[in-house]
Image: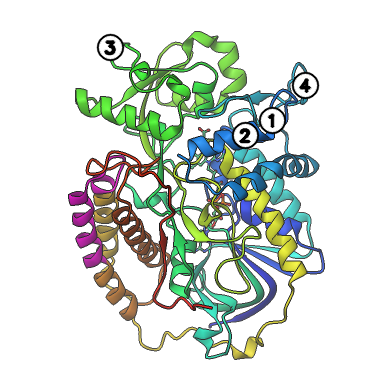
Amino acid sequence: MQQQFNYDVLIIGSGAAGLSLALQLPKDKKVAVISKRELNAGSSWRAQGGIAAVLDPADSVESHIQDTIVAGANLGNPKAIRFTVENAKQSINWLIDQQVPFTEETADSSGYHLTQEGGHSHRRIIHAADRTGLAVSETLINRAQEADNIDLLTHKVAVDLITNAKSGLPGNRCIGAYILDQQSGHVDAYHAQAVALATGGASKVYLYTSNSDGSSGDGIAMAWRAGCRVANMEFNQFHPTCLYHPKAKSFLISEAVRGEGGKLLLANGEPFMQRFDERLELAPRDIVARAIDHEMKRLGDDCVYLDISHRGKAFILEHFPTIYQRCLEYGIDISQDPIPVVPAAHYTCGGVITNEQGLTDIDGLYAIGETAFTGLHGANRLASNSLLECFVYAQSAAQHMVANWQPNADINDINAWDESQVTDSDEDVILSHNWDELRRFMWDYVGIVRTNKRLTRAQHRVDLLLGEINEFYSNYRVTSDLVELRNLAVVASLIIASARQRKESRGLHYTLDYPHSANVARNTILTPPNYLWN
Ligand code: FAD
Ligand code: SIN
């Protein structure tokens, strides 16, 4: 039977962004944090390298700002960058207060070991060995489980947002969400005074990715359908180094491996980064990923190699225990042998447009973490700025919610989910087929190197798929697979539309038809048909 639930704050997503927001809200607010899979299903859990912050007295806020601007190919919003970088230290202190076990280094003036990653001109990445995400997530989950005001709810899939407009009420406000309970199979209505999308990115739209299966851009698609604008969806970051092995599904080899001296090599042992950028292996990610893609295509090779063996086994075991162990399981001893690597889709730089407080175009609706577009990343995200963005904006969103607390529509005003017109599907093969087709053409046509022709082809394919998927959605009962496929198709169409609008190459968007950057850097802003202009 369908049910109704009432919360003060509904947070969709249990990653770094969602959990931090929940923990920063006052204890008198009743909070639900929902996750469509287990609590540890998102990207946060997988994060390896660490969190960027100025913690060394020899480093400076101005330098971190400058590195972020340069990596973002001059498209980042200087105000958002300064806001994030200036709040970084405070966020790290908050994490330390929550008892995150960061790796310590007594020789370091900050007290913690700081590693180096591409695009950073200083060592400024605080980390917990090579499993920072796990350390942060476990700690935050523990704290949330201890809090009486927070309900952590798993296997609940948000299908769509509930707005005043959808409920026939006046105003432009979000008042909850429809949520599929995977156990009962019913879609329940969750009513809340404030709703936060913390649903992570959309890298699953590509065939090869470092992300887990749930990165299907649900928050971006839901916000778009509800009437929010999105920006810069063409900037999909490909991480240069994911393990290349037939049995290794989406395992990342952290950029910190290059930060600690790892060299990129061709199959014959020849280094090649010197031909692409004077910063060599520590050039920003877009440059390194394109260089690898170029060499693989030029030589017809399946991968390149990353060699850290010269640092010796003791160093490798201390700094990269997870990567060492995982590679060993696939028969690669990284203290002896180079690691076969390929680029894979890693991070969604664009997203739902928000202000400095995480507020979207709809009152009461916030977006934080990878699902949001704050303006921080510009055309390419600087390594380890993503977790940082989760923490900084979780805090500002929490403060804004509390300062602008407004009672919403009554729970009785919300319409129950209508499933009177639908039946159970007997053709789920359509879902798996469309899922595969979508991710393959996105990889082939909207990947690291683009052209007008490829983008037009992708547009035709996605239009066809959207038609089929929407028909399926109207006729059959929702399942989590259908929800994700529908959202992936929406996000793919937003990526393609944004890429087609950008008549230049900049950062992660590289097209053979316009190989140079325009003189003026502009964001690509897409406006949904139901956007309410003020
Ligand atoms: P996620 O952690 O992805 O969480 C999303 C949550 O939303 C999940 O709980 C998911 O179940 C839930 N969800 C999604 N859709 C729905 C729905 N419809 N209904 C209900 N729940 C839903 N960044 C760094 O800064 N430093 C790093 O070292 C680093 N390493 C990385 C390594 C890997 C392998 C990957 C993949 C990413 C890495 N990143 C790193 C990027 C960073 O981890 C992510 O950008 C960040 O963790 C995103 O956090 P989030 O809270 O926004 O989303
Ligand atoms: C990594 O460890 O290479 C990932 C860092 C990031 O995505 O910022």
The stretch in magenta equals 443-465
In the structure shown, which secondary structural element does the residue marked by tag 1 occupy? Answer: loop
Gap in angstroms between the C-alphas marked 4 and 2: 18 Å
On whether residue 456 falls in the magenta region, the answer is yes
Gap in angstroms between the C-alphas marked 4 and 1: 14 Å
- Residue type marked 4: Ser
Gap in angstroms between the C-alphas marked 2 and 3: 37 Å
Most common SS among magenta residues: helix
Residue linked to disc 4: 109
Residue linked to disc 2: 64
In the structure shown, which secondary structural element does the residue marked by tag 2 occupy? Answer: helix
Residue 12 in sight here: yes
Residue linked to disc 1: 60
Q: Residue 236 carries which label?
A: none
Question: Residue at horizontal 62%, vertical 60%?
Answer: 358
- Residue type marked 1: Ser
Using the image as rendered, state which of residue 275 and residue 465 is in the foreground. Answer: 275
Contact? badges 2 and 1 (CB < 8 Å): yes
Mark 2 / mark 3, whichever is N-terminal: 2
Tell me if mark 3 has few (under 14), some (14-19) or many (20+) residues whose alpha carbon lies within 10 angstroms of its own. Answer: few
